[in-house]
Image: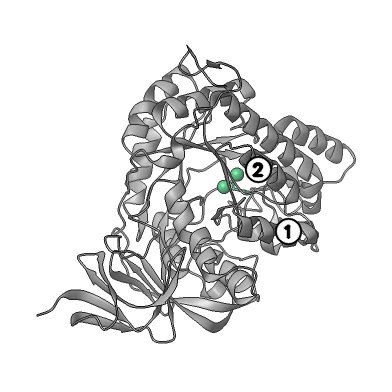
Amino acid sequence: MTEFDLVIRGGTVATASDVFAADVGIANGLIVALGRDLGVARQEIDARGRLVLPGGVDTHCHIEEPPAGKVRNADTFSSATASAAAGGTTTVIPFCMQEKGGVITPSLRDYHRKAEQAMIDYSFHLIITDPSDAALAELPGLIEEGHRSLKIFLTYDNMVLDDAETLKVLALARRCGALVCIHAENHAAIAFLTEALERAGLTQPKYHAWAKPVAVEREACHRVISLAELVDTPIHIFHVSGVEPAEEIRRAQQRGLKVFAETCPQYLMLTADDLDKPGFEGAKFLCSPAPRTQADKEALWGFLRDGTLSVFSSDHAPNRFDDRHGKKVEGEDAPFSVVPNGVPGLETRLPILFSEGVSSGRIDLPNFVALSATNPARLFGLHPRKGAIAVGADADIAIWNPDRKVKIRNANLHHQVDYTVYEDVEVTGWPEITLSRGEIVCWEGEIVGHPGRGRFVPRAPYEHIAPTGRFVTPFDPVSGRTVKGS
Ligand code: URP
Ligand code: ZN
Ligand code: ZN
């Protein structure tokens, strides 16, 4: 009798805690058995000499966002999710952005419609650009529908929230059960430094890093941690770039606050010197926060190992380089302040972490699985359905050849961006086969899944978003009640 739709046979399975030899039995899109010598299956994959890992969960990526002026995202849900799958990722959480001055629901319906072309499963963070009464009135219903994470920016002209607005969002998240993610940089300081640099005629891409020194990130991290502490709301800090902000986060965690944080490949691989390439080339590397120093790059590994930074995301930003809708939107001599921010990275996220982390001996395999899949799934309420190799989990699996050497070339990637910041970087370890809910979606670099097979994953309340119950005074400003034991 055929018991399984598919058996992955003879591989080495790794989870966030263990590494063991096992076959993986799959039926109806789920993992239904783990063990030696599993019985017959309709289809088999020979995984001898391969690692069988949970498909990656990328909880910070920008996909098919609406045009901002003349700037257009190069990727669609179809191309971005194909690229993610080719890089071993099986779930993404991109963003639905509230239009400034508008409400959220129409944008969200639009995102859901666009995401119908996704090849792998997805959920959404809701970006709050304007916590008006109307927007705040919509949020409880949208959170209840399963959009259990909000994102706010402490910088960027058209998105920045001040402290009062930030507190409003944090308080609402606590009331409704949602995690608030933060882009933490000090807006006024950046504006001040940018203006001074421009007055001095220092406008090339390299001055982006001078306009956004680490102090602007460290200050914003400290501030938002303090605001979250006042209302006892868990937060997640996006794209931590170096030692000083990471130390703020570690201190908060040591004080028992629910402060979570991520970093991204660009902060392990780039420094501010990469912005200082001839001509306009440095614009390819321009992202926020800015890449830091060699010492920051190296130190971030320690924060990844000790759990200060528990998530590794791509922050994929699909701006083309040679295109009047991307980095060159204002031309090749444009000042850094008008160059679209961000670097592409959905497909290279995991090969970079595997190669620089596992193959280079900086992290072990369970740590890789935790950072790339299990922790993000847990933090965003997708676990144990996603981010796990366990009986009952979705059969979202990446089969890796740990010894395969690949020279990264943009021409071989599946996104629609015309460059990668990792051109010619050689990595050791590559995902050769990716399965989403038991279906092969990428086989040896060839996309075999079809757009539209991805599904929205709604998220129910979960442990990470529960408050700590600790207040800085004997008064809880969210419930309006006097509390004991503070
Ligand atoms: O430079 C970046 N990170 N661009 C993408 C948007 C954001 O700030 O996350
Ligand atoms: Zn950001
Ligand atoms: Zn981002």
Closest to the observer: 402 or 211? 402
Residue lying at 52% horizontally and 31% vertically, measured from the top left: 233
Q: Is mark 2 within 8 Å of ligand 2?
A: no
Question: Circle 1 — which element?
Answer: helix
Residue 466 location (% of width, % of height): 44, 34
Q: Residues within 10 Å of mark 2 (few under 14, many from 20)?
A: many
| Quadrant in the picture for residue 201 | top right
Residue 146 location (% of width, % of height): 34, 39
- Type of amino acid under label 1: Ala
Residue lying at 41% horizontally and 44% vertically, measured from the top left: 124
Q: Is residue 147 left or right of residue 257?
A: left
- Give the alpha-carbon distance from disc 1 to disc 2, as whole Å: 14 Å
Residue lying at 26% horizontally and 60% vertically, measured from the top left: 392
The quarter of the rendered structure image containing the N terminus is bottom left
| Quadrant in the picture for residue 426 | bottom right
Residue identifier under label 2:
249
Q: Is residue 439 left or right of residue 318?
A: left
Answer whether residue 322 is visible to the viewer in this image: no
Answer whether residue 225 is visible to the viewer in this image: yes
Residue identifier under label 1:
299
Q: Is mark 1 within 8 Å of ligand 1?
A: no
Image height of 185 relative to 52, above or below: above
Residue furthest toward the front? 485
